[in-house]
Amino acid sequence: MATFVLIPGAGCDPWCWTFVVAELVRRGHDAIPVDLPCDDDSAGFEDYAAKAIATAGGRSDLVVAAHSLGGYTGALVAERLPLRLLVLLTAMIPSPGEPAGDWWTNTGYPATEWDVHRLFYNDVPPDLAAECESHGREQSGTPMNARWPLRSWPDTPTRFLLCRDDRFFPAAFMRQVVRDRLGIVPDEMPGGHMVMLSRPLELADRLIGFLD
């Protein structure tokens, strides 16, 4: 049995992982979503990582799955805990010393018109999208300004799961980022940016499949 520590993206409540947690547990694993201090202006990524580590609570056989902005936190956790695996789920991949606020320019992110429903919820049923938004929280800008503290990528087995229908992090763009920053070929599945809501069963299958 593995323990999955699930790190949300920017301004997201742990609720977004509800359906994936249920599927992982149903398949015999432990699953714990992290309640990040994202709305605390005094908290940076070091504090986010500390909260994730505390959430893990000394458990073993750990898998961290980090979504979107959670990639910055997930890699810090991988540096500090002996993980079985780090899974980056359509996530930002930091470079040493890079502030998250610079990631967009540094990666050549394609500018797009900001529309939350089009970018995040394009394949999520409207009732689930509304429920997720009701759990939304403010995302402090504090973590965006500090340099990412690691000098290199953690020595932890890492997989990247790309979502082919993601309009926020388009597939072609992310394939290049993954090649440039991790030197690996990403795994791919259908689904948009909030794939944990639109395809929780398939996502749970993918996460468990990585254990092999």
Image: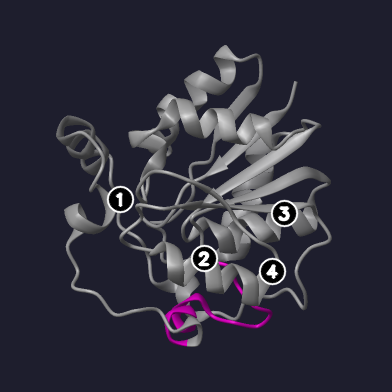
Q: In the figure, 116 relative to 199: above or below?
A: below
One can see residue 23 in this view = yes
Q: CA distance from mark 4 to mark 2?
A: 11 Å
- Indicate yes or no whether the magenta region holds residue 99: yes
Q: CA distance from mark 4 to mark 3?
A: 9 Å
* CB under 8 Å between discs 4 and 1: no
Tag 1 secondary structure: loop
- Which region shows up in magenta? 93-105
Where residue 158 sits in the image (x, y, percent)? 72, 54
The earlier-in-sequence mark between 2 and 1 is 2
Disc on res. 137 = 1
Q: Which of 200/81 is in front?
A: 200
User: Residue at the spot x=63%, y=55% of the render?
Assistant: 74
For label 2, the residue is: 92
Camera-side residue: 135 or 103?
103
Q: Amino acid at mark 3?
A: Thr
Label placed on residue 158: 3
Q: Report, in whole angstroms, how far the alpha carbon at label 4 lies from the one at label 1.
A: 30 Å
Quadrant of the frame with the N terminus: top right
**Rendered location of residue 56, percent (x, y):** 68, 36
Image marks 4 and 3: residues in contact by CB distance under 8 Å: yes
CA–CA distance between discs 3 and 1? 28 Å
Amino acid at the residue labelled 2: Met
Quadrant where the C terminus sits is top right
Three-letter amino acid code at the position of disc 4: Leu
Q: Position of residue 75 (x, y in %)?
A: 67, 60
| Location of mark 4 (residue) | 182
The part of the image, by quadrant, that contains residue 140 is bottom left
The three-letter code of the residue at mark 1 reads Arg
On the image, which quarter does residue 129 sit in?
Answer: top left
- Which is more foreground, mark 4 or mark 2? 4
